[in-house]
Amino acid sequence: MWFWGKIGGAAAGLTLGGPLGALAGAVAGHFLIDRETDPEAIAARDREKREVAFTVGVIALAAKMAKADGVVACVEVQAFRRVFSIQESDLKRVGQLFDLAKQDVAGFEAYAGQLAGLFADDPATLEDVLSGLAQIAAADGAVHEAEAAYLMQVGAIFKLDAARLRRALARHMKLPAADPYAILGADPGASDDDLKRRHRALVAETHPDRAIARGLPEEAVRIATEKLAAANAAWDMIRRERGLA
């Protein structure tokens, strides 16, 4: 996992700030202070800041979600490890961060609010965060009512529109209305041409290469890959249903 090396090494100088920065600093054992003046170095630090924010944010929000139903199921832990590809050598530190977030006096609203601010210009990444959380919540076969409410609250803090919210959750939760349309963020009454355009736009937005270009970590790229596969599967289902070529 890239994250711990950057916290302990190259990213030791970046400033994340806020409740997420406090968590990262507590695990890293030092405060993160930006001392770079070179424009290229500052740009690199900004990319690293987004990577660290994404990873710490999802870990912190997942930890808070674990308290929603009062139980941390083994399969949820396994799903968490799949999303983050955690190596055995990193398990202890990830566990420390997870436990710190659970115990932290800051509520999940503080973590979600900081992420919303950091990625205000990038709603697709916020959608990815919510989708990753939903995947973890659904790992035990069902999303608990309290977890569902938590996910909806996080989505509201992220200011995700109805289409993004449904798309982030539809792959992992049973939602009203036709699931393939929900995954595309489209109305079941939309025309064939509108649905084709919606699918093409979603493929362009969720392509893993775009996540890489946005400077996001491998965990985000993995989520984007899964979203792309889900969008393509949903479109295939709609094509078969409508008899489209």
Image (cartoon, grey):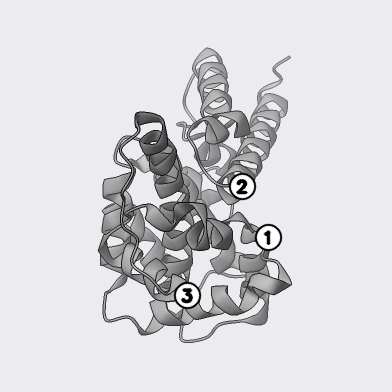
Within-10-Å neighbours for mark 2: few <14, some 14–19, many 20+: many
SS for tag 2? Answer: helix
Residue 145 seen in render: no
Q: Amino acid at mark 3?
A: Leu
Q: Is residue 22 above or below residue 152?
A: below
Picture coordinates of residue 141, whole percent (x, y):
65, 70
In the image, residue 35 lies at what x, y percent?
A: 31, 49
Which mark, by number, is residue 218? 2
Q: Earlier in the sequence, mark 2 or mark 1?
A: 1
* Residue named by callout 1: 85
Instruction: State yes or no: discs 2 and 3 in contact (Cβ < 8 Å).
Output: no
Residue 163 lies, with reference to residue 9, above or below; the image says above
Q: Where does the image place residue 225, in percent across and percent down from the top left?
A: 65, 40
**Kind of residue at badge 1:** Ser
Residue at horizontal 51%, vertical 22%? 201
Looking at the image, which is closer to me, 222 or 72? 222
Residue nearest the viewer, comparing 156 with 4: 4
Please tell me which residue is depicted at 65% across the width and 67% down the height of the picture: 81
Identify residue for label 3: 97
**Is residue 28 rendered to the left or right of residue 219?**
left
The vertical placement of 176 against 212, above or below, is: below
CA neighbours of label 3 inside 10 A, class few (<14), some (14 to 19), many (20+): many
Say above or below: 90 vs 163: below
Label 2 and label 3: CA atoms lie apart by 19 Å
Mark 1 and mark 3 in contact? Answer it, CB < 8 Å: no
